[in-house]
Amino acid sequence: MFVRIGRTLYALAIFLLIQSPPLASARGVPIRGQVIVSNGTVTGTVSKCSCTDQWYTVGLRRGETTIVAKIKGHSGVAAPSFGIRVGLLRGSQTAGFAQAACLATQSHCRASTRISARLASSGAYYIKVSGLGSNGISYTLHIQGSIYRLR
């Protein structure tokens, strides 16, 4: 009995380790996912499973920052609608949030959404993209703001 419980706990620990977003450090700044070093566009794919959430780390100076998220395509819709959620975070605080959605019956949905945030302080910010209702949602993020390279 204890062997079975031990194996189950070991398997659960390995699963949780695999599912957690990668963390690294740039002189004490925790890095999650891809690091963004300049204004521009990044692409990615997410699904309805939180295990595919995409993380980005960006150094932002105080002032206006804009993130535009666009749905580019989807596959395997498992609900009446599908979409993406985008959050801009500083630590555990949300600096901005937006979502874009499409009906599953739409063959060519190109929904988009925008986060416009006036940041009160400079530092490391995180962008989290999550999917809803589909097995694969491709997207682009266009980031515009006073970005600096984290050290």
Image: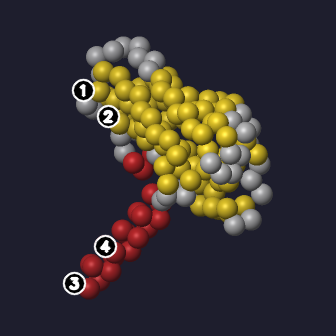
Give how far apart the Cα atoms at labels 2 and 1 are: 8 Å
Q: Position of residue 150 (x, y in %)?
A: 74, 53
Residue 140 appears left or right of 135: right
For marks 2 and 4 on the same chain, the one whose residue lies earlier in the sequence: 4
The amino acid type, in three-letter code, at marker 4 is Thr
Q: Position of residue 45 (x, y in %)?
A: 50, 35
The amino acid type, in three-letter code, at marker 2 is Gly
For disc 2, the marked residue is: 133
Tell me the quadrant of the picture where the N terminus can be found: bottom left
Give how far apart the Cα atoms at labels 1 and 4 are: 36 Å
Asked if the residues shown at circle 1 and circle 3 are in contact, with their CB atoms under 8 angstroms apart, the answer is no
Tell me the quadrant of the picture where the C terminus can be found: bottom right
The image quarter containing residue 103 is top left
The amino acid type, in three-letter code, at marker 3 is Met
Q: Nearer the viewer, mark 2 or mark 3?
A: 2
Give how far apart the Cα atoms at labels 2 and 4 are: 30 Å
Question: Residue at the spot x=67%, y=32% of the render?
Answer: 144
For marks 3 and 4 on the same chain, the one whose residue lies earlier in the sequence: 3
The amino acid type, in three-letter code, at marker 1 is Pro
Give how far apart the Cα atoms at labels 2 and 3 are: 39 Å
Question: Residue at the spot x=42%, y=50% of the render?
Answer: 51
Question: Helix or strand or loop: what does disc 4 sit on?
Answer: helix
Q: Position of residue 32 (x, y in %)?
A: 59, 54
For disc 4, the marked residue is: 8
Q: Nearer the viewer, mark 2 or mark 4?
A: 2
For disc 1, the marked residue is: 80
For disc 3, the marked residue is: 1
